[in-house]
Image: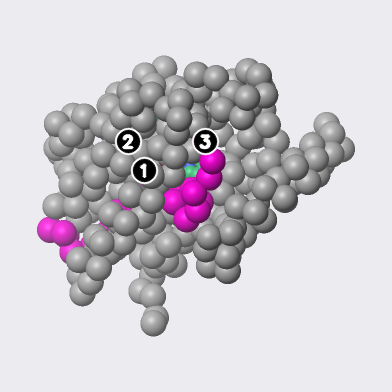
């Protein structure tokens, strides 16, 4: 089926989780290309810094995306501020928890679901009426490759990202025949602060690693920079994609989930140490 293109470049956008990582890169990229950007994050200092670095018009608000009323208030402010019709809403804010299911703490998993899933639902509910009234624009919800495959020690994260995928797919089909799109983003490993900001009570693999060591190991196997991720997401939305895979590892995970729907982890577990060693060598050569 032919995909209708959607031009968002130079048009207003909303981005949550814009103080760091992919959200910050998206804000910088789109602002640099002329888009007025409304950005939100729970990290006040990071948000201030991000806003100050943007070359164009910006509305910045400290916001917890898990607070449905706060997100509705933010949407009201954005509506007042909009210099032109809204082109896209990037429900990007997210966090991680690493734990075995056996040791998982309900308060950590609830914290994550409130942000990763309910934050996406809150952002969609708050901004969808604006896009529907315009009959134009895109809701772009960030899932993960962990919304395509289940990974050990990531049960809450995987559950939240599978939920984002299901929610966004359902929305896409509801929007058939309208000018509004629903887009799911599945990033592979992106070199951001996500692992450093994660809640990890103890090494889930029992290897006694500190959180910093685990974050460094995660970063060693990431394949994509946040700027590159922002470019892929931007291009995917403009091309009218319903689903955007970000990074070579995302294509690999997607293929594995189809080819070996119950045994994909056998392949991943075998490939992981080799990937880690190769990335480490590449980094040593670059430094
Ligand atoms: N980095 C990766 O490898 C990767 C892979 C797949 C998916 N993702 C997803 O990409 C998105 C962006 O993550 P990132 O990698 O850029 O991480 P990051 O930690 O660099 O950025 C996430 C941002 O979200 C903000 N945030 C956290 N809780 C919030 C809340 N309650 N309300 C508002 N903002 C909040 C943080 O303050 C931070 O600025 C997340 O949804 C994440 O799950 C990341």
Viewer-closest of 189 and 256: 256
Identify the element where label 3 is drawn.
Answer: loop
Query: Height in image: 33 above or below 52?
Result: below
Residue 115 shows in this picture = no
Identify the element where label 1 is drawn.
Answer: helix
CB atoms of marks 1 and 2 within 8 Å: yes
219 sits left or right of 50 in the view: right
Query: Height in image: 98 above or below 157?
Result: above
Characterize the local packing of mark 3: few (<14), some (14-19) or many (20 or more) Cα atoms within 10 angstroms: some
Residue 142: percent from left, percent from top: 40, 47
| Residue identifier under label 2 | 113
The CA span between labels 1 and 2 is 6 Å
Circle nearer the N terminus (1, 3) = 3
| Residue identifier under label 1 | 160
For residue 174: magenta? no
| Residue identifier under label 3 | 153
Question: Does mark 3's beta carbon lie closer than 8 Å to ligand 1?
Answer: no
In the image, the segment drawn in magenta is 132-153
Characterize the local packing of mark 1: few (<14), some (14-19) or many (20 or more) Cα atoms within 10 angstroms: many
Circle nearer the N terminus (1, 2) = 2
Q: Where ligand 1 lies, by image quadrant?
A: top left
Viewer-closest of 261 and 135: 261
């Amino acid at each position: 089926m032919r995909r209708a293109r959607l031009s968002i470049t130079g048009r207003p956008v909303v981005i949550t989780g814009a103080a760091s990582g992919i959200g910050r890169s998206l804000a910088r990229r789109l602002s640099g290309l002329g888009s007025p950007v409304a950005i939100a994050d729970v990290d006040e200092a990071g948000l201030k810094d991000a806003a100050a670095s943007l070359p164009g018009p910006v509305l910045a608000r400290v916001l917890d995306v898990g607070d449905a009323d706060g997100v509705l208030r933010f949407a009201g402010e954005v509506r007042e501020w909009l210099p032109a019709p809204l082109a896209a809403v990037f429900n990007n804010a997210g966090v991680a928890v690493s734990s075995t299911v056996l040791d998982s703490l309900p308060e950590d998993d609830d914290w994550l679901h409130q942000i990763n899933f309910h934050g996406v639902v809150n952002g969609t509910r708050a901004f969808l009426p604006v896009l529907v009234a315009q009959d134009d624009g895109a809701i772009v919800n960030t899932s993960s490759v962990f919304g395509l495959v289940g990974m050990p020690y990531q049960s809450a994260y995987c559950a939240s990202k599978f939920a984002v995928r299901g929610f966004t797919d359902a929305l896409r089909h509801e929007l058939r025949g309208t000018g509004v799109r629903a887009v799911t983003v599945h990033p592979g490993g992106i070199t951001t602060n996500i692992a450093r900001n994660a809640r990890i009570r103890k090494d889930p693999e029992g290897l006694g690693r500190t959180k910093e060591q685990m974050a460094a190991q995660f970063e060693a196997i990431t394949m994509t920079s946040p700027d590159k991720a922002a470019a892929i997401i931007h291009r995917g939305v403009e091309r009218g994609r319903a689903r955007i895979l970000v990074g070579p590892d995302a294509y690999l995970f997607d293929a594995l989930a189809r080819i070996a729907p119950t045994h994909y982890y056998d392949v991943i577990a075998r490939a992981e140490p080799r990937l880690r060693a190769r990335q480490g060598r590449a980094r040593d050569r670059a430094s």
